[in-house]
Image: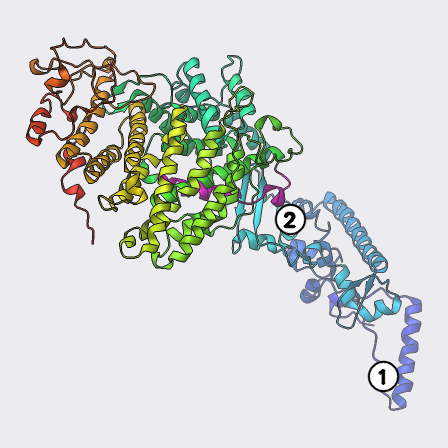
Amino acid sequence: MSEPSDRGSDESSPPPTESGDRDRERERDRGEDEADGDRPPPRKRQRVRLSCLECRRRKLSCDREFPCSRCLQSGTPELCEYETRPGLAPLNKLGLSHNSLSNFDSRLSLPLGGGDSTYHRKDIRETDRIRRLELEVAQLKGLLEKQIQVPSDGSTVVGHSPNVQDVQKAGTNVVADVAMPPFLQCQDTGADKELRFFRGKEFKTRYFGPHNAFLAFSELTGLCPFMQETSAEWLRPLHIHNNKDRSKLAEQRQARFEEPDPALESLLPSREETDSLVSIYLDQFEQVHRIVHVPSFRREYAKFWDPSEKRNAAFTALILSIMGISSCLDAHSPHKFDKMVSNSHASALKWVESADEWQSRQSQKHRRLIHYQIACLIYLAKRINTIKKKRFWKGAGALTQDAVTVGLHREPSHISHKISPFNQEMRRRIWATIQSYDLQASFDHGLPTLLSSLHYDVNQPRNIDDDEFDEDTKELPPSKPPSEYTFSSYQHLSRQSLALRLELSKVLTGPPEELDYDRVIRYTNDLNQEIDSLPSWDVSNNGGGSVLKKPLLAYTLLHIQLRQYIIPLHQPFLRLRKTNSKYQYSEIIYYNAARDMVLLNDKLAQQGIRTLNFLREDNLTLAINLCSVTMLQPRGSTNMIMINSQHTLQLLEKCLTMKEDRILRCGNNDPWGYSIMCASFGLLEAHLGTKTPEAAKAASAERFINLHYKLLACQDRSNGNQPPQPTESGTKCPSAIPYPTVPSLELQIQAVPPFPPTSSQLGPPAQPLPIGCPLEIPATQWWPPNTDPSLLSQMQSINPDFNLEFLGLNVNELWGGDSWDWDQT
């Protein structure tokens, strides 16, 4: 027989044997007999061709390896494919999900010629052949062992072992399903699974809601295994992989975190001053806004001052932020001033700005608990010191957005098991603190809050003290009953009224026409119910421990944050009282809410707790509210508000006293507020008839200038500030000058008063007081009532040497000019 021209076909046929020749002769004879009987010859059985498809197409000899040497030489190993037996998947596809290509990179690196090449090629052939056989055996074994049932629709049901007939009926589909790679197998993620994406651990977390690319990534269940197998089988052999050493990078980040910051440390005062300021913060603010864990903070604070321990920059920034909060609340008095700013406020400004600048340089990706603590402390320090007041709402919103991106608004015990119990509780506390910031900033500015439209399910902070758990706690202790006061009582109880306050915030910042009077009454009743449900702790029981408990502070803030909503709810209906008597309820509830809030703040001030006086602007708003509701009443009216008019003046006096105390500690960096309060007080006196309009105006100016005269008296001479010297006509100083009472302040007089007193008040001529003499504070006015206006104006001539420009004030801008020409249309 002649040799066939198709070499590839010849290569694909087995070598001839004697038995094979006899079989072919019998088949030829049978075919001739059948042809004689006019029957079609039988169709020959198709044999599997062992050469690869690419070699058969190119009509080349094939060594029948996978991939074969021809395909390797041509540089197209991916085109090497073989025919398969019925019921089995293609060998190359089966090999991709296993280790058939594990030696692909070694084969690419082998030389194509030489004896070593032949030796390695034979070894590779045997290895691939063994692996293919093992793969086929595993497929058949899995097919027999797997308990399946093939219904009519082709789906797979667990619980039935197939027999041979089932397998034959299933045919290729069953085998293909068994041999399907893991990334192609259908995985049920659960129909009730929430469409949220959360990753990370502790405080280094990231949270994404629905419609996010990361969520689509997690929903595509086979994507991760597919990418991993592709990388392991195709990219790593070609050295296309990430060379990033994550452990080394983590060590480098830890080393950078532990490094000190000499610039921040240079701002630290002495150990004694730092201890005093830190104690003020822990005693007062940590009983309202839970930011640090007090026992662990004290341990780190002790190490911070240990010379053998290495300081890290983060803890230094934390201490500077804390001192920025409590700097102006320090009990040491009098506070020295540099013009309008006290030295305490200047130090706080320097500490806060340095900590804020350091915080802005930190990575947004690799953050820890201390970074969020510093962010909360910096915002609190800015509110205390009135730094960038117009940015409070924006800053609180930025904190809320940062908290949402890390998932602080979601319950940590439900979304991840990589968060320790300690950090779970700290996440709840930090979120509650940021919530309080955002809600108060929204109320103060009259702007909406992001929290109103945000879904959150984080639990309220537990009513437990800090010494009941630490970083090594495996399980948090149960929450104590609300009637038992702890440092976390405010946050624990504040959560109960959060839904109502969020709804009110949304209503008050929404369209005003939607707020009808029936809804106002309903909201007022809801607020009163929340107020009545608050516990009344024993304020005389300060508890034990190194830090005294102040339940009155939490009690006051819980009441104020609810009562404050009553005033804007009823304010639109005050003027309607003249035409409809049903709105008399709004007047009474409005007045009572403002009065109660003043009394609550005054009770704190009497105990020396200035936390809320610095944290909130209640004194300004309440003074205006009381004056406004009283001015709406006609003079001579016998209703409750006018009968209590003298009590209202006393309430305004308390507001002014608390405002003055803050200014004398921090400085009048917001002179608009105090000038408005003085003018409101004088306006109400003129309306009630206790003073003539001229006397009321003179008293308002007197009070305003007297406060700034005190600032002159407290100027720090070490900075080169010299107050104006008295002239010959003003050298006499009375033994008693009517300054407002300021608790726990011993002012030093250094100049003459701006308003010279009358002769009746002076009595016999007195020698001028030496600089540094103590100032006595009487409770009498400078002039008797009903004084002749001409005489009054003459005796109230301002000292020409007293100039507020020394303090940086433009009185015309505060009390007159175009700035008050507001458009009322």
Q: Residue furthest bottom?
A: 38
Is 154 or 571 nearer to us in this picture?
571
Left or right? Give the position of 410 relative to 758: right
The quarter of the displayed image where residue 221 is located: bottom right
**Where does label 2 land, which residue?**
228
**Where does label 1 land, which residue?**
41
Percent from the top left, x then y, of residue 100?
A: 73, 51
Percent from the top left, x then y, of residue 285?
A: 45, 29
Q: How many marks?
A: 2
Left or right? Give the position of 207 relative to 807: right
Is 85 or 45 nearer to us in this picture?
85
Percent from the top left, x then y, of residue 393?
A: 37, 42
Specify start and end residues of the magenta stretch as a single range.
392-419
Left or right? Give the position of 559 relative to 111: left
**3D distance between C-alphas at marks 1 and 2:** 54 Å
Percent from the top left, x then y, of residue 515?
A: 38, 57
Q: Disc 2 residue type?
A: Gln
Dot 2, how many residues are within 10 Å of its Cα: few (below 14), some (14-19), or many (20+)? few
Q: Magenta part mainly helix, strand or loop?
A: helix
Label 2 element class:
helix
Identify which residue is drawn at 14% across, 8% down. Answer: 767
